Amino acid sequence: MVIQKKINIQDDKLLNGLMPVLEIINQIEESSDENITIDFNSTRFVSPLFVLPLMVYLHGNPRQINCVNLSPYLSTVHFPDGIIPDGMRRSEFLAHMEGYVHKNFIPIVNFPASVRNDDEKNAILSTVESIISRQLGLAPNIVAGLKYMIGESIDNITEHSESERGYIFAQAYPKKGYLDVCIADTGITLLGSYRKQNNNEIESDLEAIQAANRGISTKNLPNAENRGYGIITSKKMLIDGLGGHYVMISGKAIHLKSKELDKFLLLPEQFRWNGTIITFRIPYNNNAFSYINYLE
């Protein structure tokens, strides 16, 4: 089976990136073929919320799925596997990342996510944050918020997902003044994390994503609300402080949050991610923003 779609994602709505992924997944799930090819010959432009959800799905699918005729952009960002910094010399990784300083995007970075690799992981992410900041000439107040949001999301992967690897990918839109950052893992999902703590009150992906976004920790259920997954503060910074947009996907549940929208949705059965994906749309030209105002 060959899947060939004309993909040209318009960035005016963050969720536009996810729609083609759902269409591709639907075609794959409806097929009985064990060998599937996705032909990107007609692809013009994609976004982080297209790239990482598709990667997570492909990596969790047992069938042989090949991606061919990648666009120059997809090749440059190292789709579908990303670059592996801990498989390079440190100097080689730094030199490779320097090649993106004058671009509006970074490559997909496939980083070690386990606790035992914390120092290496933190050094990799510090480089990623530095490149993004230099690309856009970000003011210190925005840099502080960016580092906090990325750091909290990555810590959740390390502490809860049981994923050996994590992924981060970012694309900026300088004419419009915002940055899309997507972070993903291929771990046990939010529901799996709650189940591991023998919590029997959360029974579905939808209940799990609702609990995580209310700040309910896997370690202190059912009555305590505490730091939990550490995402409450990040969302306040992003949405209340910067007027941004937030998307979380885990298993087959999705959470959408902005100043105008706050929804939890359960996707149809054929759409399921073996992991958790978070995307921030960050307006970065806000001189009044102070991340300290949002710290707990």
Image (spheres, rainbow, N blue to C red):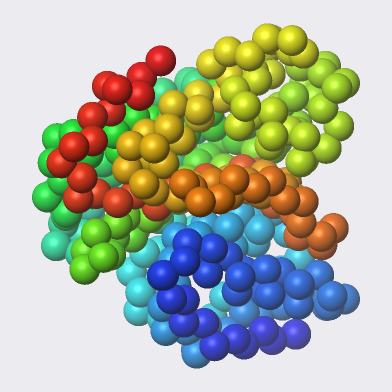
Q: Quadrant of residue 191?
A: top right
In this picture, residue 194 sits left or right of residue 104: right
* In-front residue for pair 268/251: 268
At 67% across and 68% down in the image, what residue appears? 22
Which part of the image, by quadrant, shows the C terminus?
Answer: top left
In this picture, residue 125 sits left or right of residue 82: left
Say above or below: 87 vs 9.
above
Residue 16: x %, y % from top left: 52, 69
Say above or below: 253 vs 193.
below
Residue 120: x %, y % from top left: 35, 29
Say above or below: 104 vs 115.
below
* In-front residue for pair 235/204: 235
At 29% across and 34% down in the image, what residue appears? 145
* In-front residue for pair 124/295: 295
Residue 39: x %, y % from top left: 58, 84
Whether residue 101 can be seen here: yes
At 49% across and 48% down in the image, what residue appears? 258
